[in-house]
Amino acid sequence: MKDLQEYVLDLPLHTQAFFSLVEATANLVDVSEKYWQSKGLNGARIRILVEIMKEGGTILPSMLAKKIGVTKANISLLLIPLENDGLIRRASHPKDGRKSVISITNDGQSILLKHLPENRQGIAEKMKVLEEQELKQLLFLLNKLSRA
């Protein structure tokens, strides 16, 4: 029991920083998720639509899976409801018929245009506790961690 205490209570600085980062992220994600739920939408599905838009509106399923951190097998399951709702469409890859590409539809774009501004404003409100220089420093540190 005493040996376990050092991993639960006596946390070194790097572990404290990690858990603070996790908690802060969870709080911000919760703000976003509550927004999407209040609109009858699913935040994970919205994220997929956003990732597709970041790539210009069309993406390979394998690339999308990598971007959102799921397996290639799971991405197909995640795409089914979006396709059924008419928010995305699948088509054969123009150069390699064995592959498919995912494209966001006009309806998918409309949902993002309608809801992203208000969602982003809610996140911005939470982030206002940081001054501009602190935000820049946070971005620098997070990018540094991402490259580690």
Image: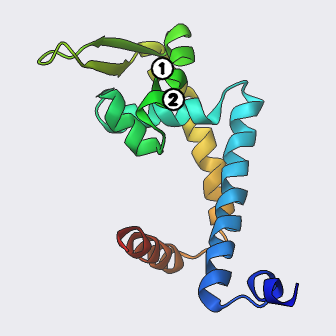
The percent position of residue 69, horizontal first and vertical second, equals 47, 45
Q: Residues within 10 Å of mark 1 (few under 14, many from 20)?
A: many
> Is 84 above or below relative to 30?
above
Marks 2,1: beta carbons within 8 A: yes
- Mark 2 element type: helix
The percent position of residue 38, horizontal first and vertical second, equals 77, 31
> Is 90 above or below relative to 76?
above
What residue is rendered at 38% in x and 31% in y?
52
What residue is rendered at 45% in x and 23% in y?
109
Q: Tell me the quarter of the picture where residue 100 sits.
A: top left
Q: Tell me the quarter of the picture where residue 46 sits.
A: top right
What is the residue that sits farthest to the right in this orientation?
1
Q: Which residue is mark 1?
A: 108
The percent position of residue 101, horizontal first and vertical second, equals 29, 20
Mark 1: which amino acid? Gly
Question: Which mark is drawn over residue 112?
Answer: 2
- Mark 1 element type: helix
What is the residue that sits farthest to the left in this orientation?
95
Way the structure is coloured: rainbow
